[in-house]
Image (cartoon, rainbow, N blue to C red):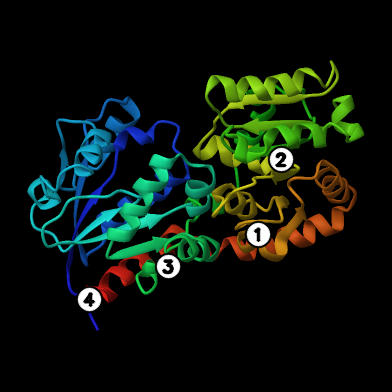
Amino acid sequence: MERRLIRVACLYDMNACYAPTGVTRHALAQIERLAARQDVDLTLVSGKIARPEGREYWEALNGVPRRELSVPTRHLLRWWRLAPLPPMEWLSGPVDWIYCPAEFHVARRQARVAVTSHDVLQGFRFGSERLRKNMSEALRRADLVLSVSEFNTARLLEALPECAGRIAYVPNAADDLFFEPAPDIDRAGVRYDLGLPAGVPFLLSVANFQPRKNLARLIRAAATLPEVASGDLALVMLGSGVPEEERALRDEIARLGDWACVRLPGYRQGEALRAIYAESTALVFPSLCESFGIPVVEAMAQGVPIALADSTALPEIGGAAGWYFNPEDEESIASTLRNLLDHAEDRARLSTIGLQIASRYRWDAANERLVAALSKHF
């Protein structure tokens, strides 16, 4: 049976295209696919775009009806917490659904609102009182909540049981390029790009520098491995943070001595990131609070072993491909890494399983789930 055409207004802040987080990558992947569908009439709305990365992405969507507002998105969201005007339909035109790829509370007239819930645990455990209040309001008022993992859904129902019956599972995914082999020419330049000695193997972290990512503990645990302490195995931490977060990690690195090789080269994206995964010995993801973990899927899609925290959503995403540790125990982290490094056959076997698991997390499939959820509740 052919689906009825659904009119969708998507609200997102294009300034988030700068150093995109998992939330932004989710948003852009869904926007691109909604724009290409024949059964969706999409209108894109963003606040004032100040970042060149956001402007570039906005202009690339030339064929998509879109409206850039005269005020930043954050100002509009703040205003909507105080007053119900202007309704979204005044900005986008008549629509059936207002789709927010993040936890936004929007004013509307008759359109239904679908909001993506990315990380309830982070918001309620690590977030400020204001963040908790704003997130709760957005999720309570939404007609449909799109949750990125079963773990996140369980936390959502614990925090806001009134959302029961209004939740659909729409997971994150890895971009299509991560499912293709990294070319040799890209892989050849990885160590130069990362500031590593030629030929040195390395463990990889891909995460921002927030304390919940648990990177200081990873540095200390990895440094107990003789190969890391001697500089024969490097630790590369792709990401960034506010100055005090980066300073805390650099202080940990400074305590390791002159031989240890730990690099903080900033973020990498796209083909450069794919090549780094392909050249790495393993991805290490010690997060204390994670409701999905896109780098886990990206690494698995490249056939890379994954060493993960045994808590929150990471066992759900990594499944039987993971090497698991207690993220609050440095000995457990170090022991798991030791086991991974010492057992090449097991690394190969679990990496094969990882390829199969990663194939479940494609953006095309996630977009099908999104549109099916909108259609079901239409």
Residue 28 seen: no
The circle drawn on residue 280 is: 2
Reading the image, the residue beneath label 4 is 3
> Is 262 rendered above or below residue 291?
above
Q: Are marks 4 and 2 in contact (CB under 8 Å)?
A: no
Task: Judge depth for marks 1 and 2 and give the one in front.
Answer: 1
Q: Amino acid at mark 1?
A: Gly
Reading the image, the residue beneath label 1 is 318
Reading the image, the residue beneath label 3 is 161
Q: Amino acid at mark 4?
A: Arg
Lower position in the chain sequence, tag 3 or tag 2? 3
Q: For residue 17, which quarter of the picture? A: top left
Lower position in the chain sequence, tag 1 or tag 3? 3
Task: Judge depth for marks 3 and 2 and give the one in front.
Answer: 3
Q: Left or right: 172 with respect to 253?
A: left
Q: Where does residue 222 sit, x and y in percent of width and height?
A: 81, 36
The crowd level at tag 2 (other Cα within 10 Å; few <14, some 14-19, many 20+) is many
